[in-house]
Image (tube, rainbow, N blue to C red):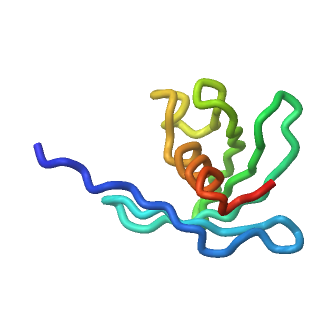
Amino acid sequence: MAPQPPRVIRLVRPPDEFGVGVFAITSKKGVQFYVFKEIPSEIGGRGFVVHRLGLADVYHVRIAEPAESSCECLGFLRHGRCKHVQGLAALIGHGMLPE
């Protein structure tokens, strides 16, 4: 079985004055664009609402310590990890989404 190509995330548009930004995730399936906005998280970490463009999918994502991060998508619910958590954590880790 051939190894899967790496998944790449890029910040297409940093959050504007309303806090709304856009990121893209490139994978073997192509490029998917997401609109996101940071929202308050009452249980710690940083909360985001994420909307995949072209679909009605909206997810609430929480970025905290790896064991405490979460997402409402099926990938996270099935496997305990997903591209939304990994992508937002990478953008935060690289200083692209300062608090």
Q: Position of residue 93 (x, y in %)?
A: 61, 50
Q: Position of residue 91 (x, y in %)?
A: 60, 56
Q: Nearer the viewer, residue 19 or 89?
A: 89
Q: Quadrant of residue 60?
A: top right
Residue 79 rendering spot, x and y as whole percentages? 45, 28
User: Would you say 11 lies left or right of 5 here?
Assistant: right
Q: Is residue 8 left or right of residue 77?
A: left
In this rendered view, identify the residue nearer to me: 89 or 27: 89
Q: How many marks can you see?
A: 0
Q: Quadrant of residue 23 in the image?
A: bottom right
Q: Which quadrant holds the C terminus?
A: bottom right
Measuring from the top left, give residue 82's x and y in whole percent. 50, 40
Eyeballing the image, is 66 above or below 92? above
Q: Residue at x 66, y 63 (%)?
A: 96
Please tell me which residue is depicted at 65% across the width and 69% down the height of the picture: 22
Quadrant containing the N terminus in the rendered view: top left
Q: Horizontally, is 15 left or right of 87 in the view? A: right
Residue at x 39% of width, y 55% of height: 7
Establish if 85 lies above or below 64. Answer: below
Identify the residue at the far top of this view. 67
Tell me what residue is drawn at x 53 percent, y 45 percent.
86
In the displayed structure, would residue 7 be above or below residue 1? below
